[in-house]
Image (spheres, helix red, strand yellow):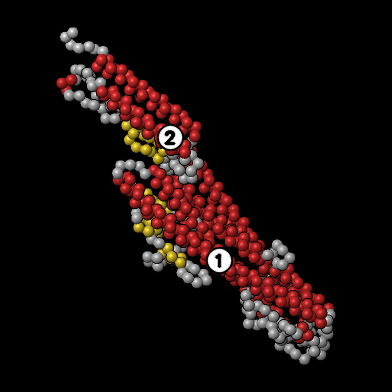
Amino acid sequence: MSNILYGLNIALKAMLSQQIAIQVTEHNVANATTPGYRRQEAMMSADLPHIFPSLRANVVPGQLGMGVVVNRIRQYNLEFFDDRYRRALSESKGWQMQADILRQVEATLSETSEDGLVAKLDAFWTGWQALSNDPTNLALRSDMLERGAALAKALNWRAQSLIRIRQDQNALILQRVNEMNSLASKIAALNVEIVAVKSAGSAPNDLMDQRDQLITRLAELSGAMAAIQENGEALVSIGGHALVIGATTFKLATTSGNVSSIYWEADATAFTPSRGELAGLLQARDGIIPSVLSRLDDLAQNLVAQVNTLHSGGYALDGSTSGLNFFDPTGLNALSIQLSSDVATQPQRIAAAQQSTSPADGNNAVALANLRELLVMNGSTETFNQYYTRQITELGINIQRAEAFARDRQDVAKSLDALKEAVVGVNLDEEAANLIKYQRAFQAATRLVTVMDEMLDKIINGMGVVGR
């Protein structure tokens, strides 16, 4: 018959295996609310059986089992869901970043308040209309200069604010680039640890959870993707360019100046993310804000040209001067538009008349007021007010679109995350049931030890001495 001590060995292995299973369950429960944690399970299997010599085959009819062992600590994982989730999340972050910057631009233009540029334009045209009714009134002339100066300052302030918003993104870019380099270094360090643990035959599940969280954050920033190699290393890339390979990282850097650009430090090639926070930030900084500023410049340039053309053909109050500019002709953009020195401090030199012999004539002021209705913008298809109003409307539409896309991608990411959590997340009810199961198995193993102890006691102390 088989050695009775086999039973003790089987009971011991059963106790140790169930104890490991209980510890893994405790670890799951402890991390039930830990972000990025994936539940684990002690995978058990029957130990290799004991094979008796053939001379005893008639006593032992077959192989005898040797109990249970824990082969590995399994981590539940769905890499396919990870890739889809990170892609949706990075797209959501990109659109959200773009929407946040566009809202700053919208607040700068201030078209929801009385200080809006449309209101300033209306006040400017109304001032010329009022002056045409009483061109000899110096108070109206001074008021006209104030309205012109207010319009020029409104354009100046908006241009300055847009330039400042654009430059402020440099700090965000530098912050994101530094964070990406730090994340890459941490992932490379974890790669080394994970490979070492796997080569020793263990499962570095918690280390892989940490690395997955870092990769997810990289995806939020830049749309990074990861491929897990057979040895456990993660190869991280962005747009086909490697960021992490094993223990090696390829860092990013930024240029200095008012508008920084991002490049790969190793080969100096430009970094152009297609998704993530950096993609949204760069799109807003280098695409949308310059477009808004360019349209403000077009408005200011045409305003200066149209007003000066009419004003320089009119006559001042004394009827003796002509060729005077209302706006400085060198201020051909929103940042530099200002009143001309011809009239800035001399309201009597505003050319409201069309005839030098009739200083009370307000026909030139009427012509200037009528600029409100002339189609002089966008290829002679829009008025000044219509042109600017359309830009504000398009900006609002872009904000709504960015927010809608951000919500849409976020909903997709949440849905994918929920599906993934159903598999890899910790279910406390399931863990409680497992805990009871492992506890009962452990108790049964301890009872087996007691049985073996009683059997050995009977054999050693209860069978007596031979010959008596």
**Precedes in sequence: disc 2 or disc 1:** 2
Residue 308 x %, y % = 69, 82
Q: Which class describes the residues within 10 Å of circle 2: few (<14), some (14-19), or many (20+)?
A: many
Q: Is residue 233 left or right of residue 344?
A: left
Q: CA distance from mark 2 to mark 1?
A: 49 Å
Q: Which residue is mark 1?
A: 168
Q: Secondary structure at mark 2?
A: helix
Residue found at x 32% / y 31%? 69
Q: Amino acid at mark 1?
A: Asp
Q: Is residue 93 visible?
A: yes
Residue that mark 2 sits on: 25
The x, y position of residue 409, in whole percent, is 54, 51
Nearer the viewer's eye, disc 2 or disc 1?
A: 2
Q: Position of residue 100 (x, y in %)?
A: 59, 59
Relative to 323, residue 98 above or below: above
Secondary structure of the residue carrying numbered label 1: helix
406 relative position to 200: left or right: right
Q: Amino acid at mark 2?
A: Thr
Label 1, residues with CA under 10 Å away: few <14, some 14-19, many ≥20: some
